Each structure stands twice: as structure tokens, then as C-alpha cells.
Image: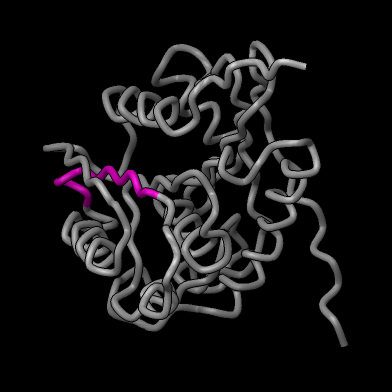
Amino acid sequence: LGMAAPAALHRSVVSPAGRHTASLIFLHGSGDTGQGARAWIKQILNQDMAFQHIKVIYPTAPARPYTPMKGAFSNVWFDRYKICNDVPEHIESIDSMCQGLTELINDEVKNGIAKNRILIGGFSMGGGMAMHLAYRFHQDLAGVFALSSFLNKDSAVYQALKRNETALPELFQCHGTADELVLYSWGEETNKMLKSLGVSASLHTFPNLNHELNRTEIEKLKSWIVKKLPVEAPKAN
């Protein structure tokens, strides 16, 4: 019988300073929480990543058994057979989480935010999740960002884009060349594949950066966010 409605995801929210006209959803890396990702960025910037008109939402993935940790429970967006780009994707867990995150997008739409005023992205596994969500199910979002992330070689995302005819959200990707967990080459290959399938994608390379975020990267991301979600002129009544 039908899937039970997924429980609403816990979320940590940074409200806009002024009128809310756009939203940003930031997905944490495996084993983290929304609160943790927000605190990490706050520590790097010495303040929250905040905007005049953009609400920033950091949801937390529900805990589930995670195969790379021998089945121990972890806050992960989906399961993986292993952390590697040439194994099949765990598509059941990816698709069920796409439902939960669609609820989150729908909540923003109910708040009066158009889908082309919503950005989604994340760090590591969060970026991978964002690419699945946007390129397979929500191609009308404003854009996608993926920091130290990758897609598996035969990803369902590539399969979906092979059949795609419409305009696609732009991708902003960052990756450190010293990343030992998610190899730079996996990120680079993901970028090339998506480009070849019609995605307008940039890849910002950070020499000597390991599997982490740094200030330059977040400042670059913030500039891109404001470019994709500019302040709207107030509508005349």
C-alpha cells in the first residue's frame, strides 16, 4: 500500500533580514545535521550565511543504516554500496528522500516563493542529493550547487538528462584538489558529464583543499547565490 507520508524534516533556518522573496536549501554532508552545517559555515565566515531577501534552510537527514559504516545508523540522505564512483547507486533510498525534500520545496512554494526563486545544493553527499532532486524531479529550480560532491558513473541523473528537452538549472560546483574522500577527478568527471548533457556548469578548483569548506569558496558561493536570486523590485500595487 502507499508509502506513509515522510515525517517533516527537522530544519535550522536563517531568516532573511528584509522581505522574504527567495529560498536556499543547504544539504549537509553524511553524518552531519542541518544545525551542524550551519554552525560550520558560521565558524568559517564568523557569522551566519545570511541575506536581505533569501531564507536559508538547513534540513537534517533522518538517521538510517549506512552501509559504508557497516550498517550503523547515520544522518545520511541516502545509502551507498560504497564511497566510490563506479558502483551502482542505491536508487531506492535516493528516490524516497527525493519525496521528503519535495515536501520541503512545496512548503516554500506554499509560502509564496516561486520555484525559479529557490536554490538547492549542499556539501559532499548533500550536493549529490541536490543534483538528483533538481535534475530528475525539479528542473524548474533557480540553480544547484555541489561542494566536494560527485555522481556515480552510471547515475540516474545522466539517464534522466539524456531524455531531457527543457532548460535546466545552472550548476555551481567547487572541489579541492587534495580531497582524499571524494576525489577531485570524480567531481571533474561529474561536471564534464553534466555539461555534455546540456547543463550550464562551472567548476571552481581549490588547490590543496581537502574534503572541507573554506572561506573563499563560501564567498564565491554567496556571490553566485545573489546572482541567481537577485533582490526583486517591489511590485506596484
| Residue at image coords 23%, 42% | 210
Residue 64, position in %: x, y? 65, 65
In percent of width and height, residue 201 lies at 28, 51
Q: Is residue 74 above or below residue 71?
A: above
Q: Is residue 171 magenta?
A: yes
Question: Hey, which quadrant is residue 15 in on the image?
Answer: top right
Foreground residue among 60 and 13: 13
Residue that sits furthest to the front in the current view: 237
Q: How many marks?
A: 0
Observer-nearest residue: 119 or 216?
A: 119
Q: Quadrant of the N terminus?
A: bottom right
- Residue at left 63%, top 35%? 57
The relative height of residue 86 versus residue 234 in the rendered view (above or below) is below
* Residue 164 in the image: above or below residue 202: below
Residue in the image at 45% along x and 45% along y = 143
Q: How is the image coloured?
A: one colour
Residue 196 shown left or right of residue 130 in the figure: left
- Tell me the quarter of the picture where residue 34 sits: top right
Instruction: Please state the extent of the stretch shown in magenta in the rendering.
Output: 170-179
Instruction: From the viewer's perspective, tell me whether residue 85 is left or right of residue 177.
Output: right
Residue 74 or 223: which is nearer the viewer?
Answer: 223
The location of residue 236, given as percent across then percent down, is: 71, 15
Instruction: Determine the residue positioned at 12% across, 37% down.
Output: 207
State whether the magenta stretch is mostly helix, strand or loop.
strand
Closer to us: 84 or 217: 217
Residue 104 percent coordinates (x, y):
71, 49
* Rendered image quadrant of residue 190: bottom left
